[in-house]
Image (tube, rainbow, N blue to C red):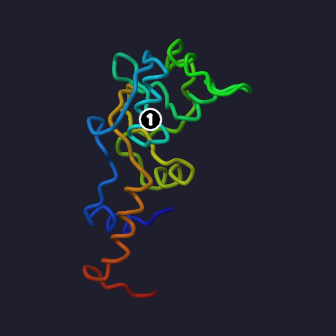
Amino acid sequence: MISKKMQAILLDSGATFYQDALDVATLYESHPLDHALLILLRTRYSKVPVLNDCEQLVGLIGIVDILNLAVDIEGLKPEKLKQRQVWEVMETDYPKVLLGEPLEKIFHLLVDQNFLAVVDEFGYFLGIITRKSVLKSVNHLLHTVEKTYDLQAK
């Protein structure tokens, strides 16, 4: 369990883990897979959130999900990507968090994920929390904590 003091120190250090939905590359479940692949390649993201027409989070999609459909024993078949949509290959079983979840839960989930999608209680996509942003904040704290706090062993 993260102590309340350490959590307060981390949050007081100006740590901002959350990236707003407006600043996140997303796809819609109705997009064709060739468009999805283009977005993933252009942004260099391994996965992106997938939304429905109401802006609710419905899945995640990655390059591997798409290529698994487009590649067979004979090689790459790009024509398959024009005929299929994101909803057909997206992941629907993935971790997500509500805005304001405890840091301990977020840190635990980020061990195995590059990012966590953040949703409200109705499933509307609000943004992401990235492992990179958490590690940058922790690194900053570790290098500056003694400038603000006196640390003593018990």
Q: Residue 44: horizontal and vertical position, in percent? A: 43, 43
Amino acid type indicated by mark 1: Leu
Identity of the residue drawn at 52% across and 39% down: 95
Seen in the picture, residue 65 relative to 131 is either above or below; the reply is above
- What residue occupies the far top of the structure in this picture? 83
Q: Residue 154: horizontal and vertical position, in percent? A: 46, 87
Q: Residue 120: horizontal and vertical position, in percent? A: 36, 32
Q: Quadrant of residue 149?
A: bottom left
Residue to which mark 1 is pinned: 40
Specify whether 26 is left or right of 66: left
Specify whether 5 is left or right of 111: left
Q: Quadrant of residue 119?
A: top left
Identity of the residue drawn at 40% across and 32% down: 39
Identity of the residue drawn at 38% across and 24% down: 56
- What residue occupies the far right of the structure in this picture? 73
Q: Residue 8: horizontal and vertical position, in percent? A: 32, 64
Identity of the residue drawn at 34% across and 65% down: 10
